[in-house]
Image (cartoon, helix red, strand yellow):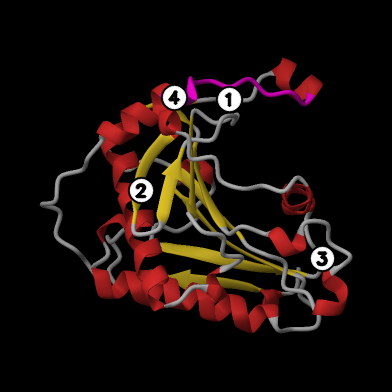
Amino acid sequence: MPNDRCEVVLYSSNHHARLTTLDSDNLVQLVNTWAARSEVLGSRKDVDYVVIFENSGREVGATIDHPHGQIYAFDHVPDRPRRRLAAGWKPDSTSERLIVESDGWVATVPSTSPYPLAVEITPVERESDLVSLDTQQRTAFGNILQDVLRRIECFYGEPAPTMMWFNQRPMVSDKRASEIEGYNDAWFNVEIVSPWRAPNVMRYIAAAEVATNEFFIPVVPEELAAKLRGAVPPQSTPPTR
């Protein structure tokens, strides 16, 4: 992928900050930056899909410790988001798997995932991408994102390795939108997963799963949701910039 379609987004000038410790102004600025870069990159003729993501922790491939995420702009719609669109993905906020609902946003545990921890964050009412969100929605999104990440830290008792990515509507012209099944029904969502079965205990994909491309669910989703509902972090952590 050309370098001009790969970007690094620094969250803070504080080397020891984490997304969970950013203050409210810094958090809003970060969400606005994600949206602005999505719009700019998505306007390019050689870009069809913009993915915002974060690898947090050396265990999942982070090569520098400074708080940051990345943005890749693809010249095609990758297979997984294309399949999710075609399947008509939408949130399933059943009470048993609901973690938290706040200001028009919900966080749930998905019914299936190969990871021992998986969370989906999505607006209650359909929005297709970050660019479409107004100021109030962006603020609320930043708040629930931070809340969920703090719950994950509380659940493990320490900062854990996580991977996070944003599923947005493809950035294609109206003329080409008809080529993508499910384009008009795209529902913005964020997925957060961790490979930890327990603190410092990794979950590995085993031979039978690789051989069959069928992956076992390592946890009961409803039980994980209940634990994350109860993982209310202390409010004493001072915010950082």
Camera-near label (1 vs 3) is 3
Task: Please tell me whether residue 220 belongs to the stretch shown in magenta.
Answer: yes
Mark 2 lies on residue: 101
As measured in the structure, the alpha-carbon distance from the residue carrying label 1 to the one carrying label 4 is 22 Å
Where is mark 4, residue-wise? Answer: 222
Is residue 21 depicted above or below 222 in this figure?
below
Residue 126, compared with residue 176, is above or below; it is above
Residue type at the position of mark 3: His
Q: Give residue 158's quadrant in the image.
A: top left
Badge 2 local density, few (<14 within 10 Å), some, or many (20+)? some
The prevailing secondary structure element of the residues shown in magenta is loop
Q: Quadrant of residue 213?
A: top right
**Lateral position of residue 111 relative to residue 80, left or right:** left
N-term mark: 1 or 2: 2
Residue 147 is left or right of residue 81, and the answer is left
Residue that label 1 marks: 204
Residue annotated with mark 3: 76
Residue 98 picture location, percent across and down: 41, 37
Left/right of residue 119 with respect to residue 186 in the rendered view: left
> Is 186 on the left or on the right of 146, as rendered?
right
Q: Residues within 10 Å of mark 4 (few under 14, many from 20)?
A: some
Q: In the image, what residue type sits under mark 4?
A: Glu
Query: Magenta segment range?
Result: 213-222
Please name which of the two marks, 1 or 4, marks the residue nearer to the observer.
4
For the residues bearing labels 1 and 3, Cβ distance under 8 angstroms: no
Closer to viewer: mark 4 or mark 2: 2
Q: Secondary structure at mark 2?
A: strand
What kind of residue is marked 1? Answer: Tyr
Give the CA distance from mark 1 to mark 3.
30 Å
